[in-house]
Amino acid sequence: MSIQSEDVLKIAHLARLGIQQEQVEAYTSDLSNIMKLVEQMNQVDTAGIEPMAHPLDQSQRLRSDVVTEVNQREALQQNASDTEDGLFLVPRVID
Amino acid sequence: MQWETVIGLEIHAQLATKSKIFSGASTAYGAEPNTQACAVDLALPGTLPVLNEQAVRFAVKFGLAIGAHIAPYSVFARKNYFYPDLPKGYQTSQFDKPIVGLGEIDIEVAGEVKTIGITRAHLEEDAGKSLHEDYQGMTGVDLNRAGTPLLEIVSEPDMRSSAEAVAYVKKIHTLVQYLGICDGSMQEGSFRCDVNVSVRPMGQEEFGTRAEIKNLNSFRFIEKGIAHEVERQIDVIESGGKVAQETRLYDSNKDETRSMRSKEEANDYRYFPCPDLLPVEITAELLDEMRADLPELPEVKKQRFLEQYKLSEYDADVLTTQRAIADYYEDAVSFSDGETKLVANWVMGELSANLNQYSLDVAASPLGAERLGGLVKRIADQTISGKIAKQVFEFLWNSEVTADEVIEREGLKQMSDSGELGKIIDQLMADNPTQVEQFRGGKTKVLGFFVGSIMKKTQGKANPQEVNKLLQEKLKE
């Protein structure tokens, strides 16, 4: 499967990445090469092999259900461009 | 043409953990905005998720209760989309390896039992809340809810009417509360449901195009929302149109659904396994522990109530809908010397009415099971009449006294003494010769006048059965 320039634009849009028109060709070629590598790997016979979800051969450590965080709103909101009544303000979004 | 409705549901149950699914921030409802949103919930760079053990245990518990396969290994995946109340730019969810696999649950509609398949249930995090009121033309974001653990319960498209859908939702609602894994509050949004609805010509195998309805935050709205949507789809098709696959919002004020956003990008979530989280392992030991920890489930409890307490189908149903009510009932019965039916009446009547009036859960009832049982005991042994019992109930509801104390203090003991009652009746007959004549002339209706007068005179304390018996005797002399 090779990647077309429309695919690049669509993926960039979904990821909210701004790319210049003149970069599209390079991305198209790079991504196509990655897909080729995937195709190559797909040739390997993996019948009977358990799919891997994570490169580390371990299972998830769990945390006890205890509240350990305190209110740090003031500190955390120092990064925000705009706040009001304790809310983060963002450009208007309407569903 | 005859149409068939096909319904499937996605229920989001907020898990009743103290802390979030991937952070140690509190999940308590109603806090000031962003006071329970920590660096992890805000997706600050360098933060990493650590999975909450209790959320995993709750999911397993649910899976066991619906007889589902519990995956020995399940995997978290990223569901990618952009919205301001989702700071990471993806929701950590589960995709192709959910923790709970195929299970099922029985519902009952109009006396018919039907099995509904549950495709899967998976763990995920909730998003924050966007507030679209006017903040200088901007949107306000509260991330307190971001990272609250959710169990998304996905049904098979097995329901064929809004009644079946509501029965299913109620069943799950009861179950998660029984299991103690979700508080079930639809108002606070801890139990939410999205409904997938489609229609097809009766007899057709293939499903029609479905629409997803959101914002159905009460059982009534689920029923009305589906009814409306079915009608709309049939109208569209019969007038030559095509149903669009889309998300629709139910507007309870107008009782209609309207298009929210097209789902054309629905398959563009670009799920992939979350590299920050390792596979979750469910050991055989944990399964055993959770199995041993399962409470008596609603169905089983109802059967037991029918047999043990000889209740009617209806009573057993109502009393077992909530585990706390069922527990209260059983406690009260034990303190009433086994007055199963009478206690049922008082729990479902007076007690429920008062709880509703003050919007209280049974757990917060000012009148505990022991004292209600004590009251019922005194009705059963005829110390007080049912009518006086309502007065006593008021005292019990409003203060910490017992029924015996109130009866003693207020002098409410029932008058059953035939000598004493007899004297009152004699006097009454002497004072009202006309009515006595009327009775003897066949107008038996005047009996009510005598009973009423005696009750008035004794402030309702006369034993009604005794009064009736004595009156009949004396009037017929």
Image: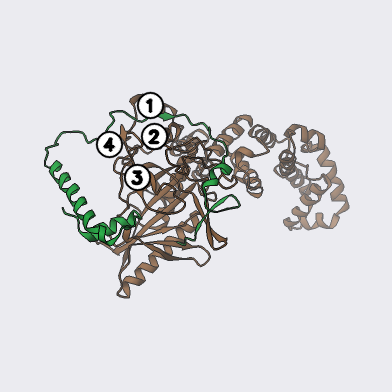
Dot 3 or dot 2, earlier in sequence: 2
Tell me the element at label 1.
helix
Three-letter code, disc 2: Val
Chain of the residue that carries numbered disc 2 in the rendered image: B
Give the x, y percent position of residue A17.
34, 55
Q: Relative to residue B34, is residue B5 drawn left or right?
A: left
Q: Residues within 10 Å of mark 3 (few under 14, many from 20)?
A: many
The percent coordinates of residue B132 (x first, y second) are 53, 60
For the image shown, how many numbered marks are present on the structure?
Answer: 4
Q: Nearer the viewer, residue B323 or B414?
A: B323
Colour that chain A carries in the picture = green
Q: Which residue is at a point 56% across and 51% down the rendered structure image?
A: A87
Amino acid residing under circle 3: Arg
Asked if the residues shown at circle 2 and circle 1 are in contact, with their CB atoms under 8 angstroms apart, the answer is yes
Q: Residue B366: x and y, percent?
A: 68, 38
Q: Are marks 3 and 2 in contact (CB under 8 Å)?
A: no
Q: Are marks 1 and 3 in contact (CB under 8 Å)?
A: no
Q: Amino acid at mark 1?
A: Leu
Colour convention: by chain
Chain under callout 4? A
| Picture layout, residue B293 above or below residue B177 | above
> What is the display colour for chain B?
brown
